[in-house]
Image: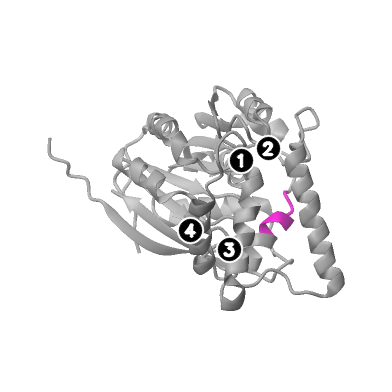
Amino acid sequence: MVDNRRTVEVEVEVEVDGAELAAELHGDPADPAILLIHGAGHCRLNWPDGFVRRLVAGGRCVVRYDARDAGASTTFPVGAPPYALPDLAEDAAAVIDALGLGRAHVLGMSQGAAVGQLLALGHPDRVATLTLASATPGIPGQEQPDLPPVSDRLAAFFAQVEQDAQAKQDAGAAGAAGAADPSAREAVIESIVEGERPFAAESRPFDEVGVGRLAARIVDHARDIAAQSTNPYLLDAGPPWRARLGAITAPTLVLHGEEDPLFPPEHGRALAAEIPGARFLALPGTGHEIFPEHTWDTVVPAVLAHTVNRDDPPRPARVR
């Protein structure tokens, strides 16, 4: 059988209200499109290249993009992001429209999964299917008194981060160095690595070398690494929406690490239970992290099966 799919890799800029978002498209634009939405403090590079290639090999067109204050997209002054979490859902809808996708299969991780929930609620016509990874129902930390809190290990890490930040403020020290500060580059890379460590599964060795290589790419890719590592955590989440999850109509797959220290697995199970017809898939040996390679043999087939276009033919993307 001859494979007539047209595989492309292109970078595009999407104009949204008050910002430009840097995006890239991988695969055949005529294939079903998967839109990847990264988490807070991350950028599009946090979606592993090998994971993207496997989705493309499975007949998907994959779009990953930098949200506001991430990667090569527009950044804002550190500590003063002029937008809220619901605006990120509007941005995702704008990316779908700008690329001419019609509807996209949306896959969001952590804060990106919160954005995915809001997108599916606010723009159901843009969402062919929804995949939510490392997620919690509704606004993190505000709507889950019935669900387990963060692990003791992660709580200790957060307390130390807050203590260090206060010490820097008291000393009048500058915040995180920008990517353009070569003297601080290695320190920033090390900070990213150590910031990822407590989120990883404890049952598996932490891939310090691999995370370090990725951190270096992230620093070099970022317009403002300080904005990326600060502003996404300061966003107003907007009105609570957990009670509205039953209104989501997109077929939904919930993926969750069995060792997630931020949102223990009960969060993912609750999320799946509150979205009509949602399916839950646990990932052994996985923490609060974007699909480590050992999960791909499970995650990729599940995502491919979930993202078969059900009702309409795929629409070719308009690449500008």
- The amino acid type of the residue labelled 2 equals Pro
The image shows residue 194 at horizontal and vertical percentages of 64, 54
Callout 2 crowding tier (Cα within 10 Å): few <14, some 14–19, many ≥20: many
Query: Of label 1 and label 2, which has the lower sequence position?
Result: 2
The image shows residue 197 at horizontal and vertical percentages of 62, 48
For label 4, the residue is 213
Callout 4 touching callout 1 (CB < 8 Å): no
Residue for point 59% across, 49% down: 39
- Res 15 visible: no
The image shows residue 181 at horizontal and vertical percentages of 59, 77
> Residue 8 bears which disc, if any?
none
Callout 1 touching callout 2 (CB < 8 Å): yes
- The amino acid type of the residue labelled 1 equals His
Q: Which residues are magenta?
A: 231-237
Callout 3 crowding tier (Cα within 10 Å): few <14, some 14–19, many ≥20: many
- The amino acid type of the residue labelled 4 equals Arg
For label 3, the residue is 189
Query: Of label 3 and label 2, which has the lower sequence position?
Result: 3
For label 2, the residue is 261
Q: State the separation of the CA atoms marked 3 and 1.
A: 19 Å
Query: Of label 4 and label 1, which has the lower sequence position?
Result: 4
Q: In front: mark 3 or mark 2?
A: 3
Residue for point 35% across, 35% down: 312
Q: Quadrant of residue 60?
A: top left
The secondary element bearing badge 1 is classed as loop
For label 1, the residue is 288
